[in-house]
Image (cartoon, rainbow, N blue to C red):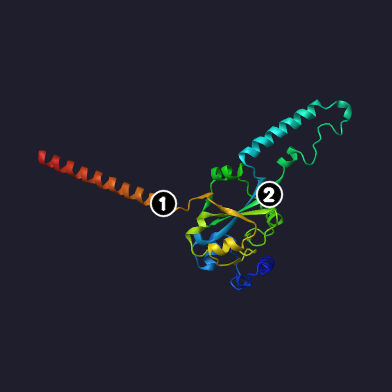
Amino acid sequence: MERCKSYFTSRNAQFLIDRIREFADSSATVELAAARLGCSPAEIAKSLSFLQRKAMTKAEAKAHQKAVLELRKQQQQQPSEEGSDSAGSTPAGSPTSALLDSTVVVIVAAGDAKVNAKKYKEKFLGQPKMLKREEVEALTGFPPGGVCPFGVNDNVRVYLDVSLRRFATVYPAVGTANSGIPLSTEELEQYASNVVEWVDLCDGWQSGGEGDGEEAAAATTADAETKKAANESAKVAEEIRA
């Protein structure tokens, strides 16, 4: 939490320090955080951490692949007398070493939202791979349950998901697994670290989902009532014929 406080101070946002709420009990999950903060689970701004190879556009990815193939071809054409130590080695700045370059992506999303793998892949040109629990603190700067977008490590890139924009106030953690802070989405965007952009990467939160379910339930009920009425009519017809 002290890391977040120092970050807010560096951003001339001391007023945010006064809003921080610290709890005696854990707020590490969406449900626990909502209970501690007195809000709905959806209003919790959860920070999801992914290990992502350096993002490239499709054109960059194509050029990168071509460069890798050319490099391999050059290596195969090298005379064997250059020595076994140099044969097959790859310069540090080569395309193949760039392939190993990675960064940490933190997606801040509503508590009821789930990252869509297809959307993620289209955005970052790779499958979503969440950080392992033992990697979280070293790579983000915060422990599991306390990851937030305030004062993250320099190589972390923060994306804000549009699922948060439904709410006037959202509640991210503040660097520990027993804390939270109320912010408007405008304040979140303004004071979060290393924000790249707003993205649409999550599903499961759209109001249409609930509406579709209600409509389906209503349709099922209507069908049942129609069948019941038809059965009753048939029964009456049989009695009349008798």
Residue 218: give x, y in percent of width and height: 32, 50
Tell me the SS state at disc 2.
Answer: strand
10 Å crowding of disc 1: few (<14), some (14-19), many (20+): few
Residue 172 visible in the current orientation: no
Tell me the SS state at disc 1.
Answer: helix
The image shows residue 168, relative to residue 64, as above or below, that is below
Q: Amino acid at mark 2?
A: Thr
N-terminal of the two: label 1 or label 2? 2
Identify which residue is drawn at 51% across, 65% down.
169
Residue 79: give x, y in percent of width and height: 85, 26
Identify which residue is drawn at 58% across, 67% down.
181
The image shows residue 69, relative to residue 240, as above or below, that is above
The image shows residue 219, relative to residue 193, as above or below, that is above
**Which sits in the foreground, 57 or 149?**
57
Residue 78: give x, y in percent of width and height: 83, 27
**Would you identify the image quadrant in which residue 6 lies?**
bottom right
Q: CA distance from mark 1 to mark 2?
A: 34 Å
Residue 96: give x, y in percent of width and height: 74, 38
**Which sits in the foreground, 102 or 71?**
71
The residue singled out by tag 2 in the image is: 103
**Would you identify the image quadrant in which residue 233 lies?**
top left
The residue singled out by tag 1 in the image is: 208
10 Å crowding of disc 2: few (<14), some (14-19), many (20+): some
